[in-house]
Image (tube, rainbow, N blue to C red):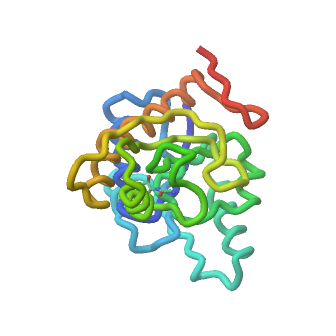
Amino acid sequence: MLKIAVLVSGGGTNLQAIIDGITNQTIKNTQICVVISNNAGAYALERARQNEIDAVCVSPKDYGSRDAFNDALLAEVQKYNVDLIVLAGFLVKIPENLVKQYEGRIINIHPSLIPSFCGVGFYGLKVHEAALARGVKVTGATVHYVDDGMDTGAIILQKAVLVEEGDTPEILQRRVMEQAEWVILPQAIDMIANKTVTQANEKLITLK
Ligand code: GAR
């Protein structure tokens, strides 16, 4: 059984897709042990509670320094003895200590086709605003392993989504979620849980 922690900051629709995937068995051999948010008001925490999953807030506001916050976040994750950390809309730069401790065991969902519209400053709606401003006709989402850079780790899955005439950032965001994110994030977790993919030395290894 793959034990996972899901880290969130907002609404938690990707968390919901994982919960649903586990319920309907598109994600097999996986258990969510804890949902952690940096934001006490995140609706994602409510979704966790409704599903009887431990829901914890670790907010930078409650700590005197960034280092103290980073240590608290690591300590909270460690309490649950998880095999994999899933960043599902966690809009905080992952502390170095966490990346070191969980090397090859952290994945992230990003709402574009990396390497487009990623890196510092590209998160949430900003990604879709930038895609529309550039006039791309195809966008999508990416699930990747997390390394010490920003959106630079090995890519596990990507799915393309068409941009349509008249799209606003909000409309495009919703389409990317529905057609790509909620599909490939559960799929990537299932692949890791059932050992069809792994990562070593920064490289993706496909096992089956
Ligand atoms: C998702 O679109 C996710 O891809 C994005 O935040 C949103 C969270 O929505 N993540 C990033 O931009 C990371 N760089 P959710 O809380 O409804 O899952």
Q: Position of residue 55 (x, y in %)?
A: 46, 61
> Residue shown at 57%/30% (left/top)?
192
Establish if 198 lies above or below 36: above
**Residue nearer the viewer, 182 or 176:** 176
> Looking at this rendering, what residue extends furthest in the left direction?
166
Q: Quadrant of residue 64?
A: bottom right
Viewer can see residue 48: no
Q: Quadrant of residue 198?
A: top right
Which quarter of the figure is the C terminus placed in? top right
Q: Is residue 9 left or right of residue 172?
A: right
> Residue shown at 62%/63% (left/top)?
93
Q: Is residue 57 left or right of residue 160?
A: right
Q: Position of residue 39 (x, y in %)?
A: 47, 72
Which quarter of the figure is the N terminus placed in? top right
Q: Ligand 1 is located in which of the four quadrants?
A: bottom left
Q: Quadrant of residue 149?
A: bottom right
> Residue shown at 75%/60% (left/top)?
96
> Looking at this rendering, what residue extends furthest in the front direction?
135
**Residue nearer the viewer, 62 or 89:** 89
> Residue shown at 31%/40% (left/top)?
162
Viewer can see residue 103: yes
Please count the marks in the image. Answer: 0
